[in-house]
Image: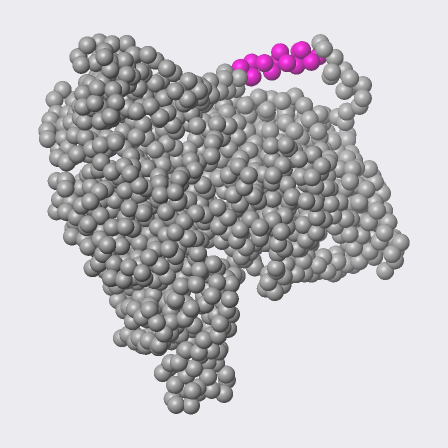
């Protein structure tokens, strides 16, 4: 090998790469990306967000690894494939200088080696420049407003992630792309490889259910080419504190480093194989002096003049064209475009890349549909609409990426095949040729979408549950995505016409996709700019795009009209001959420019008009600039004056509501009976109104009045004031469209009046005016303030309620609307009548309430004993689970806590425009997406769990409303989770209870923020991570409290708590609850110690089994030595067990069938292993399936370790901590290990 020749090839290729538009546009994209990232839009979610708190640096090694592992792969991989995969193709097929080169002493190794080194050097130049851009914006020119997220500069923080996470995958992609391009000489096949990788990482990054087997998870980490999954699952998923991330270094596991080496080795092996196969090809008929002579005869040394096949046609007689089946003369433009399209489509269907990509899309859709995970780790049903919407973002991204290369390939086909001069000599306009080629390219997404539909249909058929319907696929993928592909092809054709460069068109296309995705993820998109419809579509089986149907169709129409304009521009910019400087200057002359603009202006009218309509709709929608200004004015005018002004309490609500779901409108009229329960006379009575209200009118005690309108806060001034005990009857009447307009960029909303259904609540001014000032209206990031600093012993005295009215009230609610709807509200149904195509119902409260709702839909009903489930007629899949949970909750909670006071308990399904459930008195609202579309299975907990949780709110929230203050919401949500665990254990068995506890424990571990996590009694919901503390840790704490006190004493305490705080007027906080429970404790000192650990402190253990080895004890038994570490902050006593065999882990006695069941079946039968929570000793358990367990109680100091010997009468297989899931801990998957046994042992 000659280093001189290798170096010459290297230098020639490197300088060519550095001059290409592809290179410079790539750098520009990375420059913009580095600038955007410097503001902290992507960073580790840790640290204290309060003023003066320590923030997570975006310049730490962990933070830069997170950014680089994601961005290097996603923003490099296609550029790298374009560089590596086409470098030989250009020499051999486009410029046709290969025969000349290979007739010289240049060897295949020198040629391939030089080109590979040039590609690698270009990648390194880009990578170093990217790191330089990041360092520049992070350290030299950081934004003042984000100075606290920029730490000190350390070169290793940038270099280590780039080398470990970035380079191996880039070498692998470059090597494989090099091999594919050299072997196949098909650029489209080159680009298919990074598309496969992108499709894989979409799955690898997002699919992380809590029940996944750790071994499978580890394999997926190693398979991820970017390394992002390993980083996230190993170091970022469980927050380790801001100090750890800001100052620590990443410790790489051996398996991960081997996987990175394997990716680099894959690239090196691909290059070696490329050199071998290329050398063999040079010994074929295309090598040698004859090939050189042929190349010289064809003029192969000039790019753009590769061949001159038209020379053979010179002098050909006209009859020769007819004899060949051709046509003479100039054809009609439309017919010519169709002929061009037909010819290109034949080429398209002859390409294997089309079928490979279609199989990729089919498998992607099929896999996502079959393993899709919904709320609480529950596997969801594959329904046509949900499959289409869940797959639309990935489909749009993958197809648009492929179209970048396919479109350019088609537009460049004449040049690369040597037929450019001939095609330009034909009597067909350049515009016709461009349009025909663009139409041909659109056949690709059609085929791909058909493959996607096939994948979705197969998934639906495999599940044998949901009927197949093609309509949702046609709407979401046909009407929704085809205009995206049309405008994208037109845009690429226009860019190619303007630049006449393959590389520039690639780079612009990839850059636009990257920036589009970034803007959408950052929340900057609107209906006007979201050409990919990224995250904009919501599907409900109750109606076709009921919330955003108009902007959806306008958006699609806008981009179709824009595509027509772009195709016209592409045709106008197309060239029949090579340009010169004189021609360019002539094009820029004012007269010629004006003429060109006038010629295309009619085509611009459509996109301008539709775009203006879209822009106005967004601006005037309920999430647009108009609504933001109204809310801001409300806040500015009233926050200082009326925030803490005393207001009268609601004593009675009389509501007359008329609904027009088909028009999205409502009319509200009624009366609020207000009572002054304050100690002083109220001189003014403020009521908050809605911004959607039209022509509101008011009365006071029957007399018409005009209150002061303070930007939506209506202030009444009673004559002589409102003395203590006095009442005021305020009447109102208004109408309006709700919600008023569109969303900003798709998505949904939680309350609405729509043809698909109605959901309205008293938490906002939609049904009635709201007494007082509402602090949440108008709040924003710019107007954010620190949470209240509560004083010591804040719970003492009388506390106001955390939500709802200050005192319970009675209500009479009359609802009128179309007869095909059913109308539900709180209380009991008094009348239900229909007349003149109008259905009228009246609901009255049979027990006082603090808040209420109105929900309507076209439902069927499942009746139980005092329960009713109102559901969409097609959604019967999980109806049995939901109905049985509702029935069991009413029965068991009444027996455990207090009798249910209302006559009926209802659950009403609503469209999945927002995925949530809410427990109003007697009327639970339940989104179709949170439980009605779950797959059947013992481990699919969402339908039963969500029903049980929301039913518990009839007691914890409705009957006993918590107080406003720290720990208040824990008494609502934490007790609801605790009640759910009790119900699951009672009705489903302890195995299901354990699984529920594992999942909420995992959610707590993933979502907590240890740097600013506060004890349960101080948690007020104002900080990130508080939700997991309130729901998950709260539920766990109450469960452990019950096990500490004993079940009967806990139930006595809960009944006492309900009796003491029911209906106010003092609303409890968490210390109030604990004082009640302490009065029922057997050992007060032990109770106080437990409460101190779990309610007043933030100390959570994190166990890790590092070694487990067993040996015979010489007496027929075994001794297992277990090395146990506690990496957490708590040190409670815990059960350490060794087990053998597998047992039936379901209440029904059937073995687990869901993925990850092997990780669940290690709990000893019954409670024997966990019952001895107070001391040491050995506990043995056995069940009928042959499962055996032995356990001891241990205590490991926080941050310490210990070695424990666990005796057993059987040969152990696994060692694990807390097998019965009775102790809250972090990292449960690390608290288990396979027991090693010496080969010479027997037992």
Q: Quadrant of residue 1082?
A: bottom left
Q: Quadrant of residue 222?
A: bottom right
Query: Is residue 603 magenta-colored?
Result: yes
Q: Is 395 left or right of 1184, judged from the image as shown?
A: right
Rendered residue at 32%/21% (across/down): 688
**Nearer the observer, 179 or 1020:** 1020
Spot occupied by residue 303 in the image (x, y as percentages of width and height): 79, 37
| Structure colour scheme | one colour
Q: Is 1197 left or right of 953, judged from the image as shown?
A: right
Q: Is 695 left or right of 12, judged from the image as shown?
A: left
Please tell me whether residue 1124 is drawn above or below residue 110 in the rendered image.
below
**Nearer the observer, 657 or 700:** 700
**Nearer the observer, 695 or 464:** 695
**Nearer the observer, 1104 or 260:** 1104
Query: Is residue 526 magenta-colored?
Result: no
Q: How many marks?
A: 0
Rendered residue at 12%/47% (across/down): 865
Rendered residue at 51%/63% (across/down): 1199
Is residue 1102 visible in the rendered image? The answer is yes
Please tell me whether residue 596 is drawn above or below residue 496 in the rendered image.
above
Spot occupied by residue 214 in the image (x, y as percentages of width and height): 47, 62
Image quadrant occupied by the N terminus: bottom right
Magenta stretch secondary structure, dominant: helix
Rendered residue at 69%/26% (across/down): 498
Is residue 400 visible in the rendered image? The answer is no
Spot occupied by residue 329 in the image (x, y as percentages of width and height): 65, 23
**Magenta stretch, residue numbers:** 592-606
Please tell me whether residue 1032 is drawn above or below residue 700 in the rendered image.
below
Spot occupied by residue 313 in the image (x, y as percentages of width and height): 74, 33
Please tell me whether residue 846 is drawn above or below residue 66 in the rendered image.
above
């Amino acid at each position: 090998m000659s280093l001189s020749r290798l170096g010459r090839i290297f230098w020639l290729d490197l300088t060519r790469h550095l001059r290409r538009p592809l290179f410079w546009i790539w750098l520009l994209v990375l420059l913009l990306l580095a600038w955007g990232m410097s503001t902290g839009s992507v960073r580790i979610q840790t640290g204290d967000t309060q003023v003066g708190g320590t923030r997570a640096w975006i310049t730490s090694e962990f933070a830069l690894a997170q950014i680089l592992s994601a961005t290097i792969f996603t923003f490099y991989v296609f550029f790298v494939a374009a560089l590596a995969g086409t470098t030989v193709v250009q020499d051999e097929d486009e410029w046709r200088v290969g025969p000349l080169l290979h007739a010289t002493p240049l060897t295949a190794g020198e040629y391939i080696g030089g080109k590979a080194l040039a590609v690698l050097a270009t990648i390194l130049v880009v990578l170093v420049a990217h790191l330089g851009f990041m360092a520049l914006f992070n350290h030299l020119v950081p934004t003042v407003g984000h100075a606290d997220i920029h730490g000190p500069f350390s070169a290793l923080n940038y270099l280590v992630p780039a080398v470990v996470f970035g380079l191996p995958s880039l070498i692998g992609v470059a090597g494989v792309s090099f091999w594919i391009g050299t072997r196949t000489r098909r650029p489209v096949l080159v680009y298919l490889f990074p598309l496969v990788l992108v499709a894989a990482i979409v799955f690898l990054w997002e699919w992380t259910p809590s029940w996944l087997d750790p071994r499978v998870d580890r394999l997926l980490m190693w398979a991820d080419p970017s390394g992002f999954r390993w980083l996230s699952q190993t170091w970022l998923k469980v927050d380790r504190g801001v100090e750890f991330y800001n100052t620590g270094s990443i410790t790489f596991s051996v398996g991960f480093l081997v996987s990175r080496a394997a990716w680099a080795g894959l690239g090196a092996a691909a290059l070696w194989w490329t050199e071998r196969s290329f050398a063999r090809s040079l010994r074929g008929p295309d090598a040698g002096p004859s090939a050189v002579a042929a190349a010289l005869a064809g003029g192969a040394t000039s790019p753009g003049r590769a061949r001159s096949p038209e020379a053979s046609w010179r002098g050909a007689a006209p009859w020769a064209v007819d004899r060949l089946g051709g046509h003479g003369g100039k054809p009609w433009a439309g017919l010519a475009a169709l002929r061009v399209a037909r010819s290109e489509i034949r080429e398209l269907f002859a390409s294997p890349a089309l079928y490979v990509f279609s199989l990729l899309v089919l498998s992607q859709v099929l896999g996502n549909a079959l393993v899709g995970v919904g709320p609480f780790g529950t596997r969801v049903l594959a329904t046509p609409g949900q499959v289409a919407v869940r797959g639309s973002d990935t489909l749009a991204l993958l197809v648009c990426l492929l179209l970048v290369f396919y479109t350019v390939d088609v537009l460049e086909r004449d040049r690369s095949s040597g037929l450019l001069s001939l095609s330009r000599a034909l009597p067909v306009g350049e515009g016709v040729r461009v349009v025909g080629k663009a139409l041909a390219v659109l056949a690709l997404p059609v085929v791909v979408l058909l493959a996607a539909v096939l994948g979705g249909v197969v998934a639906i058929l495999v599940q044998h549950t949901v009927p197949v319907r093609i309509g949702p696929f046609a709407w979401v993928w046909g009407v929704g995505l085809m205009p995206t592909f049309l405008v994208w092809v037109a845009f690429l054709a226009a860019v190619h016409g303007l630049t006449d460069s393959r590389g520039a068109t690639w780079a612009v296309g990839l850059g636009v996709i990257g920036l589009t995705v970034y803007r959408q993820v950052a929340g900057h998109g609107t209906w006007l700019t979201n050409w990919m419809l990224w995250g904009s579509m919501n599907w409900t089986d109750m109606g076709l795009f009921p919330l955003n149907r108009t902007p959806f169709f306008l958006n699609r129409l806008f981009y179709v009209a824009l595509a027509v304009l772009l195709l016209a521009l592409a045709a106008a910019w197309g060239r029949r001959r090579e340009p010169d400087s004189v021609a360019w200057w002539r094009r820029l002359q004012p007269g010629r420019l004006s003429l060109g603009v006038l010629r295309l202006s009619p085509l611009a009218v459509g996109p301008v008009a539709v775009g203006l309509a879209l822009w106005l709709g967004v601006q005037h929608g309920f999430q647009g600039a108009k609504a933001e200004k109204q809310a801001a004015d409300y806040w500015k005018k009233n926050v200082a004056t009326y925030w803490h002004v005393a207001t009268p309490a609601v004593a009675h609500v009389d509501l007359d509501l008329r609904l027009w779901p088909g028009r999205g409108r409502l009319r509200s009229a009624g009366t609020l009976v207000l009572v002054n329960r304050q100690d002083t006379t109220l001189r003014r009575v403020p009521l908050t109104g809605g911004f959607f209200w039209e022509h509101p009118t008011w009365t006071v005690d029957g007399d018409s009045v005009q209150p002061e309108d303070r930007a939506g806060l209506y202030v009444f001034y009673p004559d002589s004031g409102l003395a203590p005990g006095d009442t005021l009857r305020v009447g109102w009447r208004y109408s309006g469209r709700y919600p008023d307009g569109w969303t900003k960029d798709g998505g949904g909303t939680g309350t609405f009046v729509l043809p698909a259904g109605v959901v309205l609540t008293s938490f906002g001014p939609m049904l009635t005016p709201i007494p007082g000032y509402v602090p949440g209206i108008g709040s924003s990031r710019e107007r954010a303030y620190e949470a209240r600093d509560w004083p010591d012993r804040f719970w003492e005295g009388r506390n106001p309620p955390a939500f709802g009215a200050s005192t319970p009230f009675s209500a009479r609610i009359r609802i009128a609307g179309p007869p095909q709807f059913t109308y539900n509200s709180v209380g009991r149904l008094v009348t239900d009548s229909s007349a003149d195509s109008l259905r009228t119902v009246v609901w009255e409260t049979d027990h006082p309430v603090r808040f209420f709702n109105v929900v309507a839909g076209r439902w069927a009903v499942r009746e139980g004993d005092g329960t009713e489930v109102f559901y969409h007629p097609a959604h019967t899949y999980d109806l049995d689970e939901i109905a049985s949970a509702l029935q069991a909750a009413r029965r068991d909670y009444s027996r455990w806590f207090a009798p249910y006071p209302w006559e009926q308990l209802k659950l009403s399904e609503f469209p999945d425009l927002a995925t949530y459930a809410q427990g109003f008195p007697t009327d639970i609202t339940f989104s179709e997406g949170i439980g009605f579309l779950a797959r059947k299975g013992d481990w699919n907990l969402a339908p039963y769990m969500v029903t049980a949780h929301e039913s518990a709110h009839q007691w914890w929230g409705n009957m006993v409303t918590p107080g406003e203050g720290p720990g208040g919401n824990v008494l609502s949500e934490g007790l609801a989770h605790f009640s759910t665990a009790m119900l699951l254990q009672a009705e489903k068995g302890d195995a299901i209870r354990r699984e529920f506890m594992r999942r909420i424990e995992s959610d707590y571990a993933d979502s907590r923020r240890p740097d600013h996590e506060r004890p349960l009694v101080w948690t007020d919901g104002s900080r990130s991570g508080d939700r997991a503390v309130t729901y998950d840790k709260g539920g766990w704490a109450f469960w452990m409290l019950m096990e500490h006190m004993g079940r009967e004493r806990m139930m006595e305490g809960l009944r006492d708590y309900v009796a003491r705080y029911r209906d106010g007027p003092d609303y409890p906080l968490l210390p109030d609850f604990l004082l009640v429970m302490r009065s029922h404790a057997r050992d007060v000192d032990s109770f106080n110690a437990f409460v101190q650990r779990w309610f007043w402190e933030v100390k959570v253990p994190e166990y890790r089994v590092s070694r487990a080895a067993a040996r015979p004890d010489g007496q027929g038994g075994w001794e297992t030595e277990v090395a146990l570490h506690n990496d957490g902050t708590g040190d409670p006593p815990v059960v350490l067990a060794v087990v053998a065999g597998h047992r039936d882990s379901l209440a029904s006695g059937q073995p687990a069938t869901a993925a990850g069941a092997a990780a669940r079946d290690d709990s000893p039968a019954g409670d024997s292993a966990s019952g001895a929570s107070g001391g040491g000793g050995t506990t043995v358990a056995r069940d009928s399936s042959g499962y055996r367990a032995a356990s001891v109680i241990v205590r490991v100091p926080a941050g310490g370790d210990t070695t424990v010997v666990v005796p057993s009468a059987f040969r152990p297989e696994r060692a694990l901590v807390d097998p019965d899931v009775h102790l809250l801990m972090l990292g449960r998957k690390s608290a288990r290990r396979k027991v090693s046994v010496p080969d010479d042992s027997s037992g």
